[in-house]
Image: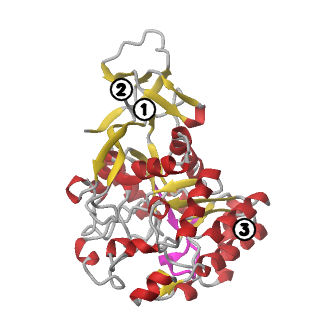
Amino acid sequence: MKIHLKNGRLIDPKNGIDAVRDLYIAAGKIAGVGQAPEGFVANQTIDATGLVVCPGLVDLSARLREPGFEYKATLESELQAAVAGGVTSLACPPDTDPVLDEPGLVEMLKHRAKQLNLAHVYPLGALTRQLQGKQLTEMWELTEAGCVGFAQADAQVTDTRVLWRAMQYAATFGFTVWLRPEDYHLARDGVAHDGEVASRLGLSGIPAAAETVALATILRLAAETGAAVHLCRLSTRESVDLIRQAKAQGLPVTCDVATTHLHLTEHDIGFFDAHCHLRPPLRSQRDLAALREGLKEGVIDAACSDHTPVDDDAKLLPFAEAEPGATGLELLLPLTLKWAEGTGTSLSDAIARITSTPAAILGIDAGHLSVGTAADVCMFEPDTYWKVEARSLVSQGRNTPFLGLELKGRVSQTLVNGHTVFHR
């Protein structure tokens, strides 16, 4: 199949392109940019007038809920949600049931995902067995099975010696350790940011220090071991400052922020809105400002959806008992565009935060439209508003704080390996 995408505004941050150019696709790969290859005759021509044509989005954190939690969502439903949101590559955390700590489980997940012919799935293997923080997994075998890094999801390694050994091992073989910094003891039993809102509502708080104390430890161990570390879903101003210092010192660290934390604060909890029960919790206004500026500066490398579909019953419980998490795959693009508009960030730079930069963090050849690479393409209407409603979401999870809000930026078509996998 040969496809000619014409008249679209082509934005490819990695290759420095932001102009109206045609794109040519053949045999599932990019065959030409701006100029047709010799002898190219299209089987299909797509008029992209008024659309932005960019690389398929790359999401650094999307829980697909398989295996083990199919009552919350299925692999098929969430990968359909991914392509509906323009996401063509995604990393999934290891906190499934069973945990992704065995090569066979990783191979099974990748095989299932490949059969669906939707988005590309890149599993993160468990850093420790059963995510219990006690015994290291067989990282080399998990890498051969298809893991792109090793994480603890929301579980913490409370034994610093175990974390030290894990980072030493990872550094030896060039693996990346993915950690969400949170001190277990400071955060224990907390459900909201330790601030005025939690105090007023009588909710148990998680202080900002729970993140920064853990982050300082991780950065110190990274300096000692030389391990490459990716810090997941930062939420505080102090964390942004610590990352800025670490990068200035030349430490091999990267980090991301969830799009929810670029727009919402503790005040959005309102009267116990369980959709705003997230991990890490929504923080203060000053934290939100620092996160938005940190992403603009590049101190924070990428934005992610932190997609966590939860069944309706688990969100109908009282706030403190409700399961944390929000669906986000279909909101990654419009929430990133909303952040860019609010901070004066160019459209090209905004798209880089959800394409080429996260692809580089994952170590995959994606997030750009270079000739010869897989034709993973997202086309979207940059000025079209749409209302976030439960019925409008493809994901099996309908849990998002943005229900009822109108967002700008709607995906019209998604291609994976040159095949249309979503069309509005």
| Quadrant in which the N terminus is drawn | top left
Which residue extends farthest left? 391
Q: Secondary structure at mark 2?
A: loop
Q: CA distance from mark 1 to mark 2?
A: 8 Å
Q: Position of residue 34 (x, y in %)?
A: 50, 19
The residue wearing badge 2 is 48
Residue 388 sits in which quadrant?
Answer: bottom left
Q: Secondary structure at mark 1?
A: strand
Q: Which residues are magenta?
A: 122-139
From this view, report whether residue 206 is shown above or below residue 375: below
Q: Secondary structure at mark 3?
A: helix
Look at discs 2 and 3 and give the one toward the viewer: 2
Look at discs 1 and 3 and give the one toward the viewer: 1
Residue nearest the observer in this picture, 349 or 368 = 349
The residue wearing badge 3 is 222
Residue 125 lies in the magenta-colored region? yes
Q: Position of residue 232 (x, y in %)?
A: 55, 65
The residue wearing badge 1 is 53
